[in-house]
Amino acid sequence: MVAIAWGYGLFGGTTAHALTPPLEQIDAFKIITVEGEDIPSVLALPLEQISLAAMIDGLLEPIPFQIDQYNVGGAVYFADWDVPLSGDPELMDATDKILFLFKDAGERYRGNTLHDGSIVAEILTRDTQGYERYVYVMRNSRLRSDEQYVRYSAEEGLVETDFYSIRYRKDNHLVWDDFSYVNYLGERPLDSLNLKLRGGVLTSLAEVELDNEQLIAVPRGEKIGPIRTTTQLDFSVYFLAVRILNLSVQIHHGPKSLMYDVRGVIPELRRSLVVEPTITMSIDANRLLGATVRTSAAPQLEGVVDGKIDGREQRVIDAGLDPHNNWIWVSTKRNLDFLSFVDYLGGFDSKMSLLFEDDLERTRPNELFPGQLPNTGYVIEEFPKRGFIGVVVSLLMSDGYDGDPDEFAVRARTLPDIEIHTL
């Protein structure tokens, strides 16, 4: 919850530590999101008048930011999508969100330097060590930062950040044509994203399995920002050349993160045709021999990737996953760790199990490299007969996580404490 202080002066309140140390890497590239309703002084202002600044080398300078507008369903708004905007397209609304990176917050402004525009609010952030960092909401400042933490080419289907790049197949953004991580020691570390829908048709005895060849996600729009890029996909499920399900998928790309937001409504008639459906979402890595795999269900157990499932890995699999605490940590030992987790939305809740494959030879559609070394992810085992489904799958990347995974898995996805001071 964001705290709001009214009539807060530039010279009052708590003070930051005299020497604020740099943020640790686990925190530095977190995307901080502040909703419009938490900054009353910007509500109804034209969006073009709003910007962010922070103290940099003793001066109040512009920092990268973006303002995302949301639809009535709670997802990023796209004009060509069939969910209406929540608010006014030109003005700051309660549901609009201002985004910036944690690392760009600076020391407190003391009122002793000139700046362009007027300060309308102070955003105080506090890290896990108690250090305070500040960002200022500006009105009518002509200055803008030209830093782009995320770069996207819709024409090429290419996303680039300072840490990773990913190229999608143009006619299906569920298929990766390429993936690279800057500091990784070796060839391409991740092979493919895998989706699989399995279920019986009318009866559980007539089971079908649909994969990336029948699950098609076509880009319908993109929001390109310096902090986060969002792509809107039209996600269709085909069976016998007939579209049986249509969902909204948004892919969010941050500097060190990748997120798939899947939402939709299951038509009762079409759902009734499928018996005991399950959906599998996983990432197949490329020959990460020697990598280790741990999960939230049994963090003390460690599977080692060697091309076969041994007793230790089987115990990791047997431990399963709690749908409400479901992180998976893969450490390559080569300057790349990835941490994944799933969140359910809007009352959707379902039993979940772990997919963990360690196989030298097995192949799947759209993979470039043979083997599942490893293939890790989630199996959602139950679907409602009708109504809303909502799932967010997140992948965080790091050169390496240290310490107790039960602790850093929580910290990696926890945003700092924030206070808003209206000036």
Image (tube, rainbow, N blue to C red):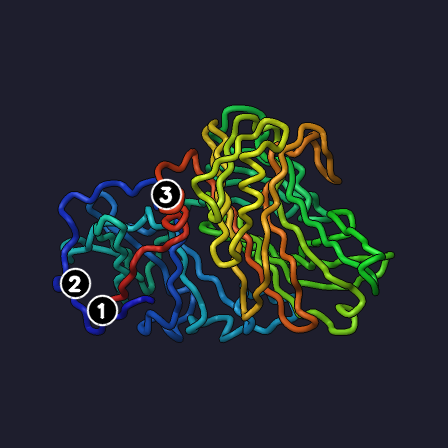
Q: Mark 1 near mark 2, Cβ–Cβ under 8 Å? A: yes
Q: Nearer the viewer, residue 316 or 392?
A: 316
Q: Position of residue 209 (x, y in %)?
A: 78, 51
| Mark 2 or mark 3, earlier in chain | 2
Percent position of residue 60, x then y: 25, 52
Rounded to the nearest angstrom, the CA distance separating label 3 from label 1 is: 31 Å
Secondary structure at badge 3 equals: helix
Circle 1 Cα neighbour tier, 10 Å, few/some/many (<14 / 14–19 / ≥20): some
Query: CA separation, marks 1 and 2?
Result: 7 Å
Q: Earlier in the sequence, mark 3 or mark 1?
A: 3
Kind of residue at disc 2: Leu
Q: In the rendered image of this protein, does residue 161 appear above or below residue 236? A: above
Q: Which residue is mark 1?
A: 423
| Residue found at x 53% / y 51% | 321
Taking the image as shown, residue 159 lies to the left or right of residue 115, namely right
Which percent across, then down, holds residue 256?
A: 46, 43
Give the quarter of the figure containing the C terminus: bottom left
Q: Sort mark 2 into few (<14), some (14-19) or many (20+) by Cα contacts within 10 Å.
A: some
CA distance for labels 2 and 3: 30 Å
Q: Which mark is in front, 3 or 1?
A: 3
The crowd level at tag 3 (other Cα within 10 Å; few <14, some 14-19, many 20+) is many
Q: Which residue is mark 3?
A: 26
Q: Amino acid at mark 1?
A: Leu
In which image quadrant can residue 110 be found? bottom left
Helix, strand or loop under label 2: loop
Query: Quarter holding the N terminus?
Result: bottom left
Residue at image mark 2: 10
Q: Residue at x 50, y 28 (%)?
A: 184
Q: Position of residue 32 (x, y in %)?
A: 38, 56
